[in-house]
Image: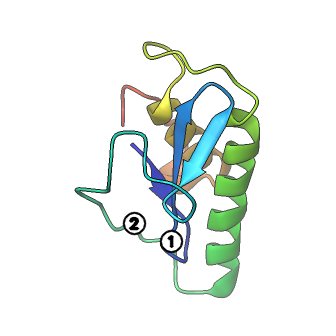
Amino acid sequence: LGIADSRGTSHDFQGPYSVGTNRNSVMAFGPTTRFLKMDIGQNLSSAERWDEAIREADRIYSQRVHNICCDNCHSHVAKALNLMPYGGGKWNMVKL
């Protein structure tokens, strides 16, 4: 599971201390096969806030150990959504 910024670059917590993008590598389990378009608003500040939250989640997860059961790519996406906060926040790996 990954999350794309406002320019369409997908970000993916791939393993210990590693967040990749589809610009510099492939996603952890191969190319994107499905995506859901999220409404981030129509003004520039919404896109900037979206991108900043993803950058912050990338920074946090690039310093974490990947745990397949408890701290994984779903957790990374949830962190980004909560930092925005998208849909009121309260995202977690189970909800995703």
Percent position (x, y) of residue 93?
43, 28
The three-letter amino acid code for the residue at tag 2 is Met
- Whether residues under marks 1 and 2 lie with C-beta atoms below 8 angstroms apart, the answer is yes
Which residue bears the numbered disc 2?
A: 38
Q: Quadrant of the C terminus?
A: top left
Label 1: which secondary element: loop
Q: Quadrant of the N terminus?
A: top left
Residue found at x 48% / y 34%: 73
Secondary structure of residue under mark 2: loop
For this orientation, the residue located farthest to the left is 33
Q: Which residue is found at the position 45% from the left and 34% from the top? A: 74
Determine crowd level at label 2: few under 14, some 14-19, many 20+ residues with C-alpha closer than 10 A.
few
User: Within the image, what quadrant is residue 55 found in?
Assistant: bottom right
Instruction: Give x and y (percent) for residue 81.
Output: 55, 48
Q: Is residue 63 above or below residue 22?
A: above
Q: Camera-side residue: 10 or 44?
A: 10
- Amino acid of disc 1: Ile
Decide: is 24 above or below 85. Answer: below
On residue 40, the disc is 1
